[in-house]
Image (cartoon, rainbow, N blue to C red):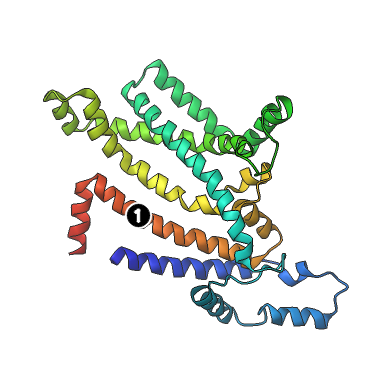
Amino acid sequence: MKKLGIGLILVVAVTLLVFSLLYMMPGNPIDIMTDRKVSAEKRAEMVHQYGFDQPLHVQYVRWMKKIILDRDFGQSVRYKVPVWNLMKDRIPRSVKLCGWSLLIEMLLALPLGLLAAIKKDSFYDRFSVNFTLMLTSMPSFWLGALLILIFAVGLKWFPISGFESARNYVLPVIALTAGSLAGTLRLTRAEVLEVLNEKYVTTALAKGLPYEKVMFKHVLRNALIMVTVSVFMSLPWLISGAVVTEKIFGIPGMGNLLLNSIVVQDFPVVQAVLLLIAILTVICNLLSDIVIAILDPRIRIAIGGGDK
């Protein structure tokens, strides 16, 4: 309950901060919606219509009240439609893109990281470390453009852009997975190496337990604690989308929407997306605490003692 209360306070603090910062940005959204030919009377009418003439705290309270009571995130300044109408079609596309990327990342990074730790200082270990460093150094926009140039323009195996079929997602998923795969693989390797030096692992092997059982039941399970935190902290971005990747491959997802909204200062859309990210981050943080407590009984006992 204590963590839940802290989480709720954090959400309120983040929403207040985001709301305030957005309205402190230079420029006026009404200037974006209109041109110089619009009269001052019409501008004043639009300012009143969107509530920009109200004090900041009044706008914030009204914004939060609409979200909580009516699930109304406001109206987009640029598209002149409710913000939720813009997001509801884009969320599934971002979830599909980022979800497949996260799944492939885990399926590859965990066993490869475990193998690199077991074969420490071997050729495979050195190769995997150097290869992941190379992947990390590749900017996502550069890798995405390279994949398009080779597999879409040159070989014509996949479409350049779009989201209609599964083939449209192959190149974006590869581009999105490459960078995150490197970090997760190295994190898994480091955690496994640390656990391998623990006394209970040496004791389990000395007792004659099968090597594979010790690796998967004792070593990998305890090494997954930090990896679990990393995975849960990645989940909010399943909905918020991959900004650069979606832009490069022309996928109209949440990342693309967020980037375009920031550029044109479409405040209601930016606020809604950031609010969604903040809430999901708090929820995923709580879920990661639960999963970590299941993986490591010592943490569960510590949490129980702390609550008392």
Q: Which quadrant: the C terminus? A: bottom left
Say which of 170 and 231 sits in front: 170
Q: Which residue is under mark 1?
A: 287
Would you say 216 lies left or right of 259 here? left
**Residue 37 lies in what quarter of the image?**
bottom right
Say which of 242 and 308 sits in front: 242
Residue 110 at what x, y percent from top left? Answer: 38, 33
Residue 134 at what x, y percent from top left? Answer: 54, 28
Would you say 230 lies left or right of 223 here? right
**Residue lying farthest to the front in this orientation:** 165
Element carrying mark 1: helix
Label 1 environment density (alpha carbons within 10 Å; few <14, some 14–19, many ≥20): some
| Residue displayed at 29% across by 48% down | 292
| Residue displayed at 45% across by 62% down | 279
Say which of 166 and 36 sits in front: 166
Residue 73: tell me if it is visible: yes
Residue 46 at what x, y percent from top left? Answer: 74, 78
Q: Which quadrant: the N terminus? A: bottom left
Would you say 43 lies left or right of 216 here? right
**Residue 60 lies in what quarter of the image?**
bottom right
Residue 28: tell me if it is visible: no
Q: Amino acid at mark 1?
A: Leu
Residue 43 at what x, y percent from top left? Answer: 78, 78
| Residue displayed at 23% across by 34% down | 217
| Residue displayed at 36% across by 44% down | 228
